[in-house]
Amino acid sequence: MLFTESAVKGTVMKNEAGIQEFKTVAWSAGPGCHGSCGQKIYVKDGKMIRIEGDENNPWSQGRSCPRVLALKQYMYHPDRITAPLKRVGGRGEGKFERISWDEAFDICEKKLRGIRDQFGAEAVVFVQGTGRDVGGPISFLAYSYGSPNWVQLGLSGQSCYTPRLSGMKATLGDFCVADCSQFLEKRYDDPEYKFPKVMMVWAQYPPATCPDGFYGHWIVDCMRKGGTQIIAIDPRHTWMTSRAKYHLQLRPGTDGALALGMLNVIINEELYDKEFVEKWTFGFDKLKERVQQYPPAKVAKITWVPENLIIEAARCYAKAKPAGLQWGLAVDMAPEATSVAQAITQLWCITGNVDVPGGNVFGKPSHGVTTYPYATEELVALYGQELVTKMNAKRIGADRYPLVKGFRGWAQPDDVIDQIDSGLPYPIKGAWIQTANILGGQAARMRFHYEALKKLDFIAVVDLFHNPTTMALADIVLPAATFAEKDGFRSWWAPLGVIQKTVQVGDCKSDYEINLELAKRLNPEVGKKFPTVKDLINSRLAVAGTNFDEMVAKGSWAMPADGPYRPYRRHERGLLRPDGKPGFNTPSGKVELWSQFYEGFGIDPLPFYLEPAQSPISTPELYQKYPLIMISGTRSPLFFHSEHRMIPWLREKMPEPLVDIHPDTAKQLGIHDGEWVYIENDMGKVRRKAKYSLTVHPKMINTMHGWWMPEEEGAEPNLFGVWKYQINQIIPGPQHSKSGFGGGQYKCTLVKLTKMRDGEV
Amino acid sequence: MSQYGLLIDYDFCTGCHTCEVACQQEHEYPAGKCGIKVTEFVTPGLHKPLCIDNVPFPTDLCDLCAQRTARGDMPSCVKHCQAACMSYGPIAELAQRMENQAKTVLFRPR
């Protein structure tokens, strides 16, 4: 398959065998993830025949994951939904009839208009799952329709990235990412880059996926190429912890105490960066006073991490120059997660690792392009202050949680489902669910979600495969495209990338095609501004001084030039603040260790520790009844959340849902390796296959989420076996905090394991 | 003509299964057939409580991606390996690298 290099490197080339090559960027549907790997897609006679990593794309440098390499099986899977469907039986009966797009849009328009006329636009919730490309199109549709209730429904405590974003916003005024040279075109070879001497990997196994726009294996690159040493904060043993200089095996949910203990050591031993703290921070003395409440000995008791390890790891991190910090979702799931994230952010701040090579650098949407509005400022830029102010006031949760009103444009998920159930303070009548398998995926107290959502008058689901959510709830199902079948764009964080359509599968449409068409019908102003998806994409790319076709011709990506969107030391150069002065984008212009942002929202301006709502310490009686701490949501490179269970190349490598259990614990319970067991608490019981593993602490068990069985009967009552395998059935609901962010108990629910009786297997 | 092989720097293999699916796509193997297979080893470590090693093993189906290498490309597993811990080359060269690198394994599948 020889291709001659064309004069323009991104244009489509055709070889003698009639095979075309497209250079594109993967995001979401297909691999499913948050990543942005460069890919080359080969097409023959209108069919995708092969995918291969694009070695010219600096993000992934030719590398790929198993999910993206299985794309062909995903795109052309016999169970793929390839036409709009209308429910013809009762909800849950699994009877659907194929309809045209015109009819599908007509029905959606009529139903959504009807609800808006009678109850107001806020009576429809717009639901997405994790932070994927759908964030752009779904917020576009919600704002065009007029509903403020854009929500990650089911995600208790908004426990995914939002608390981390909030902690960074409160401290720095902007968001940071660990620097693995991802903003530099030459990557590790750029002379400006320095490998971190130490990388603290907090609550994550990065190699499993590309979490939060970060390619997990970049850390492995730093270890291999730069000799970066690892401090791992993880209750589990993983490949990463086994390669770490220090492994702090903390009790799940106690991350906040550990961060405060480390701050205590670094401050009291005067290991912080005195020059940076003096010149660039605000509130250091108050923080110093606060951390006195968290001496390492006390923190050791809370976290189960030996005192000397806490001290040594803190010293190691503080003395390394530069040091990076990469963190994961468990931070967001800690109680009062906004405060935990704040404390961890302060670690890289007081050690002088802000926006320096190999430290934690500001991640700004590449070239200033918004694909997915992250903060209120971006929503204002896209939709105007007037509309945003109006929307903020009506958003579910805004009355209780100031951050829901003033920081991110999300409704509070726990409050949304409660309101769907109660109808108070105003009724919810419809849901637009887009590539989010609520019931098979993220919903804590899943059965309650199932029952409450059944009450809605109208539910449309956009997805690629049937799943428990489409089956149980959908009145209309609309077929979405994979990244290989659509035009798109991405700016999270760098490079700026475009995704180009290579083939058409069935009647599938991209999320933007679907949402723009419907938005035009629901809001005539939209069509005047954006006649086509290409117009919409080009309007967003305009700020970068480019357009879609130009980006494709360049090879589908572009790195930002020196300026606000490229590191380093932007605070010194006046590149962070709207007024162009040196400093940070905070009220004081400094790194706010005592946060005026939090103070303004009625949140403690200093970090503090809160014990999980369920734990050996806060609920000792419950702990006696349920003596194991369950870590759920462990990631696998084979599956993205609840996806990919139907893909043969992936599923064969992990056919069954496992629970990792320490052999000593298992033997005490009389459980054999490979035996099917129940994980159980007061909320119910869920099936798992026991796997003896030394990787798990004897007082904990570890399991993946997102399990349902596409090969089983989809119609109710079975719903693809979701009632047997969906772990979030036994995750409790609101445990969240004053801020409304955090406290989803996904990482530290108390459970017991029981053997199945004969005949139950 | 020199013999070619695979050098695996298994100190860095994270067990991500990329090599397996890369092979299956390349050879259009159905599930169940694969030219390479990753195995995880969880053992007590020398300097730490637990060591986790992953090692990919080329099966009898591995042809070192003869079609790809004939046109100058790397074998699919080597190219896509996320940890970049696999190398393809003449055995003698790989063996020389092995001299200076602990936790490596050299395969000559064909």
Image (cartoon, coloured by chain):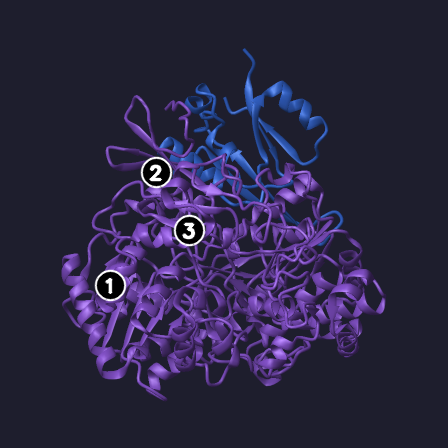
**Percent coordinates x, y for residue A222 in the rendering:** 65, 44
Chain A display color: purple
Task: Look at the picture and state if A250 lies above or below A452.
Answer: above
Can you see residue A540? Answer: yes
Q: Identify the image quadrant of residue B12.
A: top right
Task: Look at the picture and state if A177 lies above or below A721.
Answer: above
Q: In the image, which lettered chain appears blue?
A: B
The residue sitting at the top extreme is B1
**Percent coordinates x, y for residue A213 in the rendering:** 51, 54
Helix, strand or loop under label 1: helix
- Give the labeled residue for mark 2: B30
* Label 2 close to label 1 by CB (< 8 Å): no
Viewer-nearest residue: A607 or A395 = A395
- Give the labeled residue for mark 1: A520
- In the image, what residue type sits under mark 3? Leu
Q: Is residue A326 left or right of residue B39?
A: right
- Give the labeled residue for mark 3: A541
Viewer-nearest residue: B105 or A85 = A85
The span from disc 2 to disc 3 (Cα, nearest Å) is: 41 Å
